[in-house]
Amino acid sequence: MEIYQTEEQQVEAIKGYWAKNGMTISAGIFLGFAGFIGFNFYQDNQLEQELAVSDSYQTLMEQSATDAKAFTENGEKFISENGNNSYVSLTALALAKESATHKDWTQVEKQLTTAIESAPTDGIKAIASLRLARVQVQLEQYSQAFATLNNNLPEAFTAAIEEIKGDAYLQQGKKDLARNAYQAAIAADGIATSPSLQIKLDDLAQVTTLPTAKKVVAEPVVTESEDK
């Protein structure tokens, strides 16, 4: 390593190095600094947007408990303005629940479909799918319900999926298929989350009818004295 004895030598060395490599260094510094500023600006902007969306979502949830009409209107506006933000799926689930209280099943299906399409996680997607399938079974849309349940849902939801399938089969009078589905649900530890599952299966238990004993009727005995 070259050692400089005076400040003047150090300055001259720096000038010489800069003359040879200054342009490259300047470009690197500029790009690095610009990238750093841009990245941080992007992060700050994203964070600011997420906080704003979070605040809006919180306001919506508070509104849902006090003003259902305003919640529905503002909730739909929130969904249209926020694309696939993670809060959109949660808002759609809340709107579906509100519509269900009024038995507005068209809106329930619409909001649950939105929740599925915008779900940020497989878990939320599964929850929305199960709710949609239950509504479809209730509306006797059995083919649609099975399609919803067969949409690559996580294995952790197997019990709930099989129980809903059992309900669909039962409503169609397909008792054997319903029994098989309920048994599959129980095998997946479904009773832990749905205690009524065992009752549903018990109601489908095959009843063995025993043959009734033939009733013997005693014939009257005729005596000789009666013949006379």
Image (tube, rainbow, N blue to C red):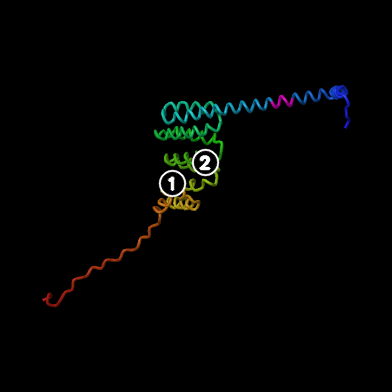
Residue 10 rendering spot, x and y as whole percentages? 86, 24
Residue 65 painted magenta: no
Query: Residue 126 got which mark?
Result: 2
- Label 2 close to label 1 by CB (< 8 Å): no
Q: Residues within 10 Å of mark 2 (few under 14, many from 20)?
A: many
Residue 118 rendering spot, x and y as whole percentages? 54, 34
Q: In the image, is residue 114 above or below residue 142?
A: above
On the image, numbered disc 1 is attached to which residue?
Answer: 167
Q: Main secondary structure of the magenta part?
A: helix
Residue 32 painted magenta: yes
Instruction: Tell me the quarter of the image containing the C terminus.
Output: bottom left
Q: In the image, is residue 21 above or below residue 202?
A: above
Direction from residue 50 to residue 95 in the image, left or right: left
Q: For residue 103, which quarter of the picture?
A: top left
Mark 2 or mark 1, which has the lower sequence index? 2
Q: What's under tag 1, amino acid-wise? A: Asp
Nearest to the observer: residue 2 or residue 181: 2
What is the magenta range?
31-36
Residue 66 rendering spot, x and y as whole percentages? 41, 29
Residue 73 rendering spot, x and y as whole percentages? 45, 26
Nearest to the observer: residue 165 or residue 50: 50
Q: Residue furthest bottom?
A: 224
Query: Residue 46 got which mark?
Result: none
Q: Residue furthest front?
A: 6
